Amino acid sequence: MSKWKTVGKILKVTAKILAALLVLLVVATGAGAVWALIYWNWYLPGELTARYLPPYLKQLGLERTEMTIRRIGVTGTDLEGLILTDAKGRKLSVDSVRVDYVPHFPWTDPRVLDIRNIIISGAQLAIRHDKSGLTVDGLDLEQLRQGAAAFGKRESGEGTMISLPLKGNATGPMVVLEKITLKSVRVLAEIGGRRVLLPVDATLTSENNAWKRISAELHLIPRGQDMQISAAIDLDRKLVNVKGNSRLQLEAVSDLLGFRASGSADLKFDTALTLAGGDMQAAGDVEATLNFPAGALPVNFARPVRIQQKFNVRYGMENRELHLRLEGSSPLSPFSFDKGAVRVESFDPVSWKFLFSQTADGGRIEDASLLIGNIKAVAHGFTATVPLLRLTGADRSFLISGSGIGVVNPERKLAVSGISLSMPLRPTPKLPAELKVGKILYDGREIGDTSASLYVKDHGLSLTGRFDTKLVDGVYAEFRGRVSPRAGELPDCLFEVTVPPYTPKQPLKLGEFVPALGDATATGTVSLGGAARLENGKFTTGVHCYVYDGQFDMPESGLHAEGIKLDVRFTDLLNCDTPAGQRISIGKLNAGSLKLDNIELRFDIESRNQTIVESLRADWCGGNVMLNSLQLRTDRQFWETSLYCEGLELAELVSQLNLASAAGTGALYGKIPLRLTRGGLQIGQSYLYTRPGVSNTIRLSDPEKMVNGMAGAVAQQSQFDFALEALKDFTYSWAKIHLEMQKDALAVKLQFDGQPNQALPFAYDEESGQLRRDPAARARFQGIQLNINTTIPLNYLLKLNEKVKTLTEGKK
């Protein structure tokens, strides 16, 4: 009995001890859990920050790192206030980093940790690229690269904890990363002095969580512009495929483009980047659609501009050789400028090709070409057609060429064809730019052709050329010019034209050039020189025209001029301004029965609207005539002046007016009022007279010609018959002539005071009280006055006026 009591007591004591131990175990477990929680949340983050991470960060060059581990949880960890500072004090900051993960027990899964997502939010990253290379604020890229390489070597040795043995002697990762997410990351890129802020959101995932094939979705917002990019990265093949699209507002990137622009650009791109064999290569294509609203550019496009660009870039990492190939095309949209006055359209796409290589010997353009075909341009009434315009070349030698170019202007009756152009981008005297014009037509008539050469010499552009006219055989003009640039100012320019002295083999038929001149011809020796100059910002022009031994004939108008000499100099061609004293002289002029000699006209062209006739003088009828200063203005329809006559021989004047054939002595003085209109010449009431008291003689050999200009009744009057008989030999002390234009005739009144030099066959009739012709009579008369009124048909002057009117009004 006592034995079982003893066993019972032992059991009771044991139970109490076990209970006490259990209680103690529970208390210890709870205390351990409390201590673990306290250590996990309060002490472990600090231990990691202070003891465990610094050696690794130092090896990566990140020893000046600040961060706070806010939480280490069973399924996630949060960091905040991550700041990396480089040796120059520049910083890279991250607002927060969240790591979401799922832990595993080693006996249930060889993987210790599945990291579902690493979320990096609010990062501020500054990237710079200049002559010294690429830098990132807060990071020493070279030390970071070396430290990462050292980690890689250590992880590849024995004792690594990256992989564990799996079933079938396979190995697998201890830690698996599924996704990385970037939120509100702000990248500040500074390239070539320009700064661009680039907000980025991105998601990176891996195929089978192996991070050998990575997919990236990026959302970039440069300057508020939306850009979507997808990338597929294959680390085994060292291949990256990038696709994306974007719609950019050009106003946001105007400063990057270098000019102020508005509108939008729709971009699509597909690019493949590879890194193999020490070479890095990128190839792909870009499609761009540019939309420019009206008025956004000096040039207005009728529809969006579409561009297709293919590219291939290869860079050798070891030899540092670069090879670039660009090929593209664009269906050029019709465009216009100058408020629509200039319109250009291409019916064929524009295409281009560009090959460039950079080696140890330097950069070289291997091949380049730009082709623009079937172009039509309309500007200010002119229409130009260009079958094909090419830009071709290699290295530093490029050539712009085109042929078969034509220009027409129907309104101005002008057509130019056979234009060809061959222009190196830097023409030299040995290899100049060449411009040829095969045919120039005006109103269907070939005018001529021209050719010119341009080249650069002594920091200036020089021009030489020649124009050969088809209008006059043997006539040509040589021209040359030069443009000399000046820093910060307008360039100095000079253009000169010279027509060497030319004398036609046969008189020129002027009617072939101006139909209104009919059968008129001209000959003589002509030379011409002109220049236009821009010097020190001042523009001047000048032309000197010289003609000598000239002759002009217009048979249908009875005009003949010889000994023509012209010496005219313009000091301002644009405003048609000449110095005073310009001179035209004619040795002899016959206009019908009128004959003038030694004609000299001096004038001054002051502008396009005003010419001053300084003086006009000529020898006529043994004396001379003069015209004083006269102002001719284009805004007037007529001009009035007077022709002053001195010492005109009376007999010669009577003969040239076709009144009769006359001889004798005596000089006339006076003036003839003239009225010049756009329709010709009109004669006002004119008075010519001899000086009284001086005896002179006049002899008319055929006075009967005056009868043709009288009415029949007047011609039968005996007084008129007596006067004509007396003037066959008449001595006068005073003579007067009155001229007046009446419609299509010139009324002439002659008055002579004197006496006949011989007895006249006239007798006095007592019944009528008048003189009657009597062949048997021989009467002598003294101190009588003779008056003759007659008219001269102005058919010649009327025809001449009609010719003038035709020329001034431009009628054929």
Image (cartoon, rainbow, N blue to C red):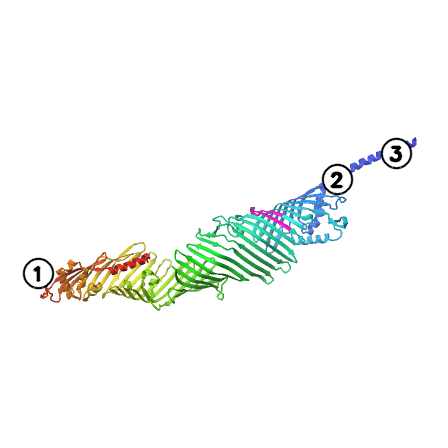
x, y (%) of residue 77?
69, 43
Viewer-nearest of labels 2 and 1?
1
Looking at the magenta stretch, what is its main secondary structure?
strand
Q: Position of residue 788 (x, y in %)?
A: 16, 60
**CB atoms of marks 1 and 3 within 8 Å:** no
User: Is residue 227 within the magenta segment?
Assistant: yes
Q: The residue tagged with tag 2: helix, strand or loop? A: helix
The answer to whether residue 161 is seen in the rendering is: no
Left or right, 700 with respect to 111, comes to left
Question: What x and y, as percent, mark residue 336?
Answer: 46, 52
In the picture, the quarter occupied by the N terminus is top right
Q: Which residue is mark 3?
A: 10
The total number of labels drawn is: 3
Q: Which residues are magenta?
A: 217-232
Q: Is residue 476 magenta?
A: no
Question: Marks 3 and 2: which is nearer the front?
Answer: 3
**Marks 1/3: CA–CA distance:** 209 Å
Q: Tag 1: Cα neighbours inside 10 Å, few (<14), some, or many (≥20)?
A: few
Q: Earlier in the sequence, mark 2 or mark 1?
A: 2
The answer to whether 802 appears left or right of 348 in the picture is left
Calculate the distance from the C-alpha at mark 3 to the C-alpha at mark 2.
Answer: 36 Å
Do the CB atoms of the residues marked 2 and 1 lie less than 8 Å apart? no
| Numbered circle sitting on residue 35 | 2
Looking at the rendered structure, which numbered label has been put on residue 99?
Answer: none
The answer to whether residue 364 is above or below residue 155 is below
Quick one: 706 or 239, which is closer to the camera? Answer: 706
Q: Is residue 13 or residue 86 the one in the foreground?
A: 13
Q: Position of residue 172 (x, y in %)?
A: 73, 49
Q: Amino acid at mark 1?
A: Asp
Task: For mark 1, give the secondary structure.
Answer: strand
The disc at residue 765 is 1
Q: CA distance from mark 2 to mark 1?
A: 176 Å
